[in-house]
Amino acid sequence: MNPDVIVVGSGLAGLVATHELAKAGKRVLVLDQENRNNLGGQAFWSLGGLFLVDSPEQRRLGIKDSYELAMQDWMGSAAFDREREDHWPRRWAQAYVEWAAGGKRQYLHDLGLRVLPMVGWAERGDGKADGHGNSVPRFHLTWGTGPEVVRVFLEPVLGAEKRGLVEFGFRHRVDELIVEDGAVVGVRGAVLEPCDDLERGKASSRETVGEFEHRAAAVVVASGGVGHNHDLIRKYWPTERLGKCPETLISGVPAHVDGRMLLISETAGANVVNRDRMWNYTEGIVNWDPIWPNHAIRILAGPSSLWFDAAGRRLPAPNYPSFDTNGTLKAILADGHDYSWLVLTQTIIEKEFALSGSEQNPDITSKDVKLALKSRLAKGAPGPVEAFKQHGVDFVVARTLRELVDGMNKIARGPKIDHDDLERQIVARDRELGNKYGKDLQLAAVEHARRYLGDRITRVAKPHRILDPAHGPLIAVRLNILTRKTLGGLETNLDSQVVRADGSVLPGLYAAGEVAGFGGGGVHGYNALEGTFLGGCIFSGRAAGLALARDLR
């Protein structure tokens, strides 16, 4: 093939860009260092959450949303404060929220993607109207989770491959962008040894068996972030803002998410901005049945579990599950330790615990209605949650608080929990129940959540005493810091063209998805509203494809 465009990376952003280019009749060469089994990249492993504004699903549930409210939430969360580095992220934020409130749902619907009728409420915020967080539920779960999001773009791309418009170069690792006369005109790199039978997500060999060079009118970098590269995460960790980087980090993304193309693009003249902005979760648990090295899963917990730091002190408001990721991360790291504890009951785990990831939600991923109803509405925790409860190294289950504390202290990496002090805090919370008044803000948040039909039916347990044996056994979960998303990256304009440090366009180079901070070099600013990562890949990949389809002759 003599390609019009080379796309580096076959994840979601790369597939979207390729889809738009192929629709316009352009020839596309897609290069990826992994094998064909990894088409779709990280998106395949995702829960498939999508940020939509004023959707039919919201309106049917009585949720009143608007572009203005969503923009207020986005800007309050992003907290843009850098005049130079936040110029394009601000522009991308406005454009993305407009799309989420406008054409995004129809664009995906036309491709065959459907969402569940119940809208989730993620990142509920820091308690300020103009601060971080979603004022209303906006997390729309894809029926089919991440694999379905990938499928609706992958199938037309594979169709274009059959027609000769798209060609894949798997196990092709790009090591250099070719620059001539100030413009990017192609790529060079190494061919890695074949591993056709290696399963998706497994770490692959880096042994080289050859070299390659390809040229085209434009190159789109869609190579993902730095989530498995702990050295880069530690190098750019925002110590002054969040505290000391955790000694223990567990990986929420496969080993190939290495961030290599950031430095390679920078060497070619691209500007990398907002390196210190990243999105690492506080609710990470070690996977008892791992796929990739150091494989971690995030717990998606409802708001009722009590959250304690490593020393057993209850975290202050509003550091509750599903409220403020970075605020809670800062509170956890404040005492010099890198883990925390959730304490809850069997009643809470059955109603409120879910696990992030397509493979942890087989009922929704397989689009099995009967299995979904049985799993979500039957008594007991969903099967994957129960499996972690039984086999996970971070879980402690006990009949009494004394036994629970003994179990917690056996797996603690820091200070020992004092039974009497933990009991005092839990009893104090439990005394707040039993009348319609009280001053415990977490209980107030739980009651507020239960006013929303979606939470009351599927997400938030009826308030009860933690130490009531009728709701037992007691459960404690050691929560670790889980690496996930890169919020900064290659600076791009609204056509996904990469920008130099002086603000001028670097001809021939485009970037989309996480490597571009999901647009502009950091569309989220300091905080994400959730459901925005897949959408950011789609929006920025689409922008790159549409711009190139328009401009290439």
Image (tube, helix red, strand yellow):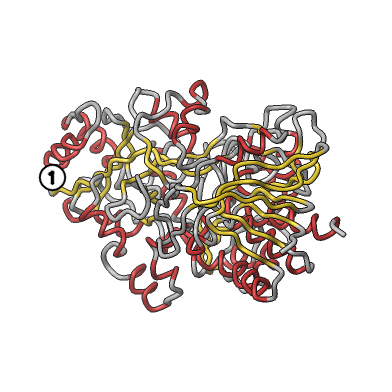
Tell me if 249 is positioned left or right of 49 in this view: left
Quadrant position of residue 341: top left
Between 60 and 186, the one nearer to me in the picture: 186
**Residue 364 % position (x, y):** 44, 69
The secondary element bearing badge 1 is classed as loop
**Residue 115 % position (x, y):** 56, 68
For the point 73% across and 52% down, the residue is: 215
**Residue 130 % position (x, y):** 63, 37
Mark 1 highlights which residue?
Answer: 400
Determine whether 402 is above or below 206 in the image: above
* Image quadrant occupied by the C terminus: bottom right
Between 167 and 44, the one nearer to me in the picture: 167
Between 472 and 277, the one nearer to me in the picture: 277
Tell me if 264 is positioned left or right of 467 in this view: right
* Image quadrant occupied by the N terminus: bottom right
Tell me if 115 is positioned left or right of 472 in this view: right
For the point 22% across and 33% down, the residue is: 412
Q: Amino acid at mark 1?
A: Thr
Asked if residue 136 can be seen in this view, the reply is no
